[in-house]
């Protein structure tokens, strides 16, 4: 039996989104308990040219919903990128999670062999098929931006552990 693109993708994206939601919640609780203005944490970045925490979480959301939409050949939901609180970011992550989990394997049939094009204002990326897109672009980006969000909050003193990023391991 071969692994379907749905089975390789949906649980991984769902886990990453769930874990990011938990990391953001710990950030919110930290701001509350330490009497830190949440806007300070949300605006933090690891280096001036890097995205701030809010944008890191938005990119994870965009990457997950965009991936599912491209592979299923449907329109992705549009989010306005106006989140200005931990609660709003968590709501966005939750909406993205519902969208990702809403696909069944049938909806991704053929995505493993169809070319995928990701358009940007200044060009496009072309992938030979859904697997190429998933393995070389989507998952590396999801993990990169999730780890940057984790790193920003960890650097800000939020008590996070590797298990917050990875989630429960070996329980299934």
Image: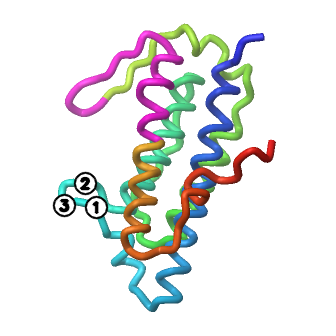
User: Circle 3 is placed at which residue position?
Assistant: 48
160 left or right, relative to 107: left
Which image quadrant is residue 153 in? Answer: bottom left
129 left or right, relative to 43: right
Mark 3, Cα crowd under 10 Å, few <14 / some 14-19 / many 20+, is few
- The span shown in magenta is 120-142
Mark 1, Cα crowd under 10 Å, few <14 / some 14-19 / many 20+, is some
Which image quadrant is residue 73 in? Answer: top right
Residue 46, which numbered label? Answer: 1
Report if residue 125 lies within the magenta region: yes
Mark 1–mark 2 distance (CA, rounded to whole Å):
7 Å
Q: Residue shown at 52%/73% (left/top)?
A: 159
Estimate the x, y position of residue 172 in percent, counting from the top left.
80, 42
Mark 2, Cα crowd under 10 Å, few <14 / some 14-19 / many 20+, is few
Q: Residue shown at 42%/76% (left/top)?
A: 157
Mark 2–mark 3 distance (CA, rounded to whole Å):
6 Å
Secondary structure at numbered mark 2: loop
Mark 3–mark 1 distance (CA, rounded to whole Å):
7 Å
Residue 126, which numbered label? Answer: none
User: Circle 2 is placed at which residue position?
Assistant: 50
Cβ–Cβ under 8 Å for marks 2 and 3? yes
Q: Residue shown at 57%/32% (left/top)?
A: 68
- Residue 26 vertical placement versus 126 (above, below): below
Which image quadrant is residue 94 in? Answer: bottom right
């Amino acid at each position: 039996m071969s692994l379907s693109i749905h089975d390789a993708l949906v649980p991984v994206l769902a886990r990453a989104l769930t874990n990011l939601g938990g990391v953001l919640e710990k950030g919110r609780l930290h701001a509350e308990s330490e009497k830190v203005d949440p806007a300070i944490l949300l605006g933090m970045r690891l280096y001036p040219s890097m995205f701030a925490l809010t944008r890191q979480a938005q990119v994870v959301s965009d990457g997950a919903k965009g991936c599912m939409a491209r592979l299923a050949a449907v329109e992705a939901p549009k989010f306005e990128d106006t989140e200005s609180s931990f609660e709003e970011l968590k709501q966005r992550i939750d909406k993205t999670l519902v969208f990702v989990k809403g696909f069944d394997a049938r909806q991704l049939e053929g995505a493993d062999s169809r070319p995928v094009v990701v358009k940007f204002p200044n060009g496009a990326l072309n992938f030979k098929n859904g697997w190429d897109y998933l393995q070389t672009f989507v998952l590396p980006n999801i993990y990169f931006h999730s780890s940057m969000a984790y790193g920003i909050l960890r650097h800000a003193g939020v008590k996070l552990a590797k298990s917050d990023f990875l989630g429960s391991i070996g329980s299934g």
